[in-house]
Amino acid sequence: MSRPTRSARALFTATLLFSESLVVLFAGLVGYGLRLLPVPTLLWGGGALALWAIVAGVLVRRSPRVGYVLGSLLQLALVATGVVLGMMYAVGAVFAVLWLVCLRVGGQVDAERVVREREEREHRERAAGGGPAVSGEGTRAG
């Protein structure tokens, strides 16, 4: 008995979101070092964005639709942090592109996995039902 396969899309996006939470924390440290905002504002804002990324990362596995929406909105929020720290325009844009790649490629992997599993199941059923041997079992001379 095999365990259920996990969604590649959920795995890719959750990994990206957890990585983003770290980037948000490091960006907060840069903002602190440059004294761009008062410390409480940096703590609350950076903490909220990091928590948002973590929650979205958990939700893409448990409630995918909600997780994907929260993750997509986070990409917009991350780009918007460029207003405070200019480099975040570029960092946010890179993560937004990676987000789209994770959604697209992960979806393709999931679709290909469904086709492969169906073909493997059909092959096992043919082999178990006494259908023609595919591996050449009956071709040995001797």
Image: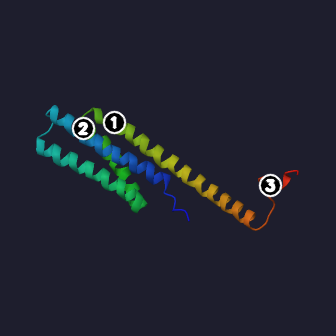
Front: mark 2 or 3: 3
**What residue does disc 2 label?**
27
122 above or below 21?
below
Q: Do the residues under discs 1 and 2 have CB atoms within 8 angstroms?
A: yes
Q: Amino acid at mark 1?
A: Val
In the image shown, does 112 or 40 lie closer to the viewer?
A: 112
Q: What residue do we see at 22% from left, 37% from top?
A: 84
The x, y position of residue 120, in whole percent, is 66, 58
**What residue does disc 1 label?**
91
Residue 28 in which image quadrant: top left
Q: Amino acid at mark 3?
A: Glu
The answer to whether one can see residue 80 in this image is no
Which secondary structure lies at badge 1?
helix
Q: What residue do we see at 26% from left, 52% from top?
A: 51
- Sort mark 1 into few (<14), some (14-19) or many (20+) by Cα contacts within 10 Å: some
**What residue does disc 3 label?**
137
- Sort mark 2 into few (<14), some (14-19) or many (20+) by Cα contacts within 10 Å: some
Q: What residue do we see at 35% from left, 57% from top?
A: 58
Indicate which disc, 2 or 3, sits on the residue closer to the N terminus: 2
Q: What residue do we see at 43% from left, 40% from top?
A: 97
Check the picture and name the quadrant holding the N terminus.
Answer: bottom right
